[in-house]
Image (tube, rainbow, N blue to C red):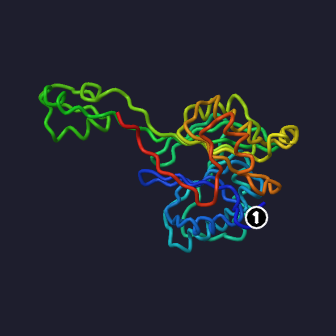
């Protein structure tokens, strides 16, 4: 439940003109305003599952987008049953100035969200639940010296860099002939309301930032098993086993009024762990070569 000074879990990821919102419990639009994040450019909403603290703010988001003058389609993704949940919330928002596209996902499905490539895995939580990963691919470096050596005019360079073949003076030039080796992109994962599983560890492998639930303190592992959640230590072990770069913990039980008190239980396993806070943000950049 939301607490004074602590909103419900939600995440925004933005790059290359694409904005994806993960989960939207009650009051999410206010949390976004507090963090000075605009709402009008949200193009995709990914829902992990249909418990109220993750989806009850959806209708507020849809109405605020309408009030902001949005005309472009918005796509909502989530587990089986998504369309029925969205239809239910839209009983109090039946008329919107834009189309709403619902896309129900199964574990292992891939999807595109603007500039991002998305994938998902099943969680264990008593109701259908999905963990998500977003990848931002990085293009291969264009090698102008190779293009020049092949006699390719500058006018064709952009097409080759975007992966298209070009024809010049009876010769077909392929992108591989003028592009460098593949380069590592960026990746973010969002995992909440689930037990740690091998499938989720595979999903989040080597991501730059893993945003993961830590609902309960380490001494309550049995309760975590019973309720389909993770402890601080379990989230840290997931990050360690998946070799992620950084771990942000979130989705704390109301009984965990001071998550910082348990941070050492996570950093003992995975040192690069941070406690998630309202408005917390970072900028990720491609690695220098």
Is residue 99 rendered to the left or right of residue 104?
A: left
- Residue 247: image quadrant is top right
Tell me where residue 192 sits by quadrant.
top right
Between 104 and 6, the one lying in front of the other is 6
Residue 251 position, x and y percent, is 72, 51
Q: Quadrant of the C terminus?
A: top left
Q: Which image quadrant for residue 34?
A: bottom right
254 lies above or below 222: below
State whether residue 8 is above or below residue 182. below
State the residue at coordinates (71%, 37%): 122
> Mark 1 packing: few (<14 Cα in 10 Å), some, or many (20+)?
few
- Residue at 75%, 57% in the rendered image: 53
Q: Farthest residue to the bottom: give it.
A: 67
The residue labelled by disc 1 is 3
Q: Is 171 on the left or on the right of 1, as rendered?
A: left
Left/right of residue 173 with respect to residue 212 in the rendered view: left
From the top left corner, tell me how far across and down residue 233 is, in percent. 74, 37
Front residue of this view, candidates 98 and 111: 111
Out of 39 and 6, give the one closest to the viewer.
6
For the N terminus, the quadrant is: bottom right
Q: Position of residue 98 (x, y in %)?
A: 54, 65
């Amino acid at each position: 439940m939301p607490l004074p000074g602590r909103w419900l879990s939600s995440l925004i990821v933005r790059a290359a003109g694409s904005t994806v919102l993960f989960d939207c419990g009650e009051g999410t639009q206010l949390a976004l305003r507090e963090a000075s994040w605009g709402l009008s450019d949200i193009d995709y909403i990914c829902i992990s599952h249909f418990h109220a603290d993750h989806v009850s703010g959806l209708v507020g988001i849809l109405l605020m987008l309408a009030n902001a003058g949005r005309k472009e389609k918005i796509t909502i993704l989530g587990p089986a049953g998504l369309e029925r949940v969205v239809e239910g919330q839209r009983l109090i928002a039946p008329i919107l100035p834009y189309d709403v596209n619902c896309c129900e996902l199964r574990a292992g499905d891939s999807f595109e969200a603007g500039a991002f490539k998305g994938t998902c895995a099943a969680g264990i939580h008593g109701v259908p639940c999905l963990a998500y990963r977003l990848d931002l691919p990085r293009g291969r470096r264009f090698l102008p010296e190779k293009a020049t050596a092949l006699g390719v005019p500058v006018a064709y360079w952009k097409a080759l860099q975007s992966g298209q073949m070009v024809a010049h003076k009876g010769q077909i030039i392929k992108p591989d002939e003028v592009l460098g080796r593949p380069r590592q992109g960026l990746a973010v994962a969002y995992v909440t309301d689930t037990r740690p599983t091998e499938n989720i560890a595979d999903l989040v492998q080597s991501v730059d930032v893993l945003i993961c639930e830590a609902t309960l303190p380490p001494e309550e592992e049995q309760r975590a098993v019973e309720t389909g959640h993770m402890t601080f230590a379990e989230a840290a072990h997931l990050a360690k086993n998946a070799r992620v770069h950084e771990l942000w913990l979130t989705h704390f039980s109301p009984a965990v009024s001071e998550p910082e008190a348990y941070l050492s239980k996570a950093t003992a396993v995975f040192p690069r762990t941070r406690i998630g806070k309202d408005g917390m943000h970072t900028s990720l950049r491609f690695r220098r070569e």
